[in-house]
Image (tube, rainbow, N blue to C red):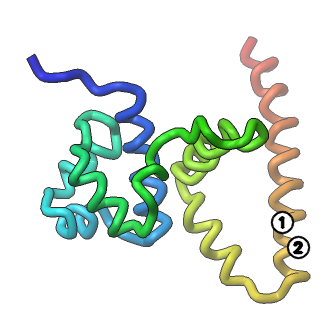
Amino acid sequence: MPKQTTDVDRLVGLRITALRKARGLSQTALGTAVGVTFQQVQKYEKGQNRVGAGRLREIARLLEVPVAAFFEDDDAPNELQGRSPDVFGFLSAQGAIEVLRAYASIEDDDLRRDLLAIVRTAARMDKKAKPAEIQLDA
């Protein structure tokens, strides 16, 4: 009977996805570089298949991160614990990497500050709209 994947396998997969996208690599490019198909990369990223230690080391090398970047950091100071999974979860959201790249490419500090204000306003408006939607459906 094959071994079942675990929450750790899914966490590793989530982080592979986020780091791969941050580097601008496709699943095909990553797979080719480590000697697997893009379908296998998909399975790693979804946590359906476990990533072997040697292959994870090679993925970390290609993505220019330490192997530890794929795991929770329980040794971090209390104020930092739990932040990495949130960041990686955010980075896996549809379009998040593209938004960050576009934002980082803006050189004018005033324009960046204005854009950030617009995004924060939109987020507040979205939060206010959701409870009303729920009340209408009830």
Towards the viewer: 89 or 66: 66
Q: Which residue is rendered at x = 56% and y = 59% of the image?
A: 95
Q: Which residue is rendered at x = 86% and y = 83% of the image?
A: 109
> Pointer 2: what residue?
113
Task: Name the residue at the bottom extreme.
Answer: 107
Tell me the quarter of the image containing the N terminus.
top left
Q: Is residue 89 above or below residue 96?
A: above
Towards the viewer: 13 or 51: 51
How many numbered tags mark residues here? 2
Tell me the quarter of the image containing the C terminus.
top right
Classed neighbour count for the residue bearing mark 1: other residues with Cα under 10 Å, few (<14), some (14–19), many (≥20): few
In the image: residue 13, left or right of residue 125: left
The percent coordinates of residue 71 (x first, y second) are 47, 42
In the image: residue 46, left or right of residue 19: left
Q: Is residue 23 above or below residue 96?
A: below
What is the three-letter code of the residue carrying label 1? Leu
Instruction: Report the Cα–Cα distance between label 1 and label 2.
Output: 5 Å
What is the three-letter code of the residue carrying label 2? Arg
> Pointer 1: what residue?
116
The percent coordinates of residue 37 (x first, y second) are 14, 57
Find out whether the residues at labels 1 and 2 contact each other: C-beta distance under 8 Å. yes
SS of the residue under disc 1: helix
Q: Which residue is rendered at x = 70% and y = 74% of the image?
A: 103
The percent coordinates of residue 30 (x first, y second) are 27, 65
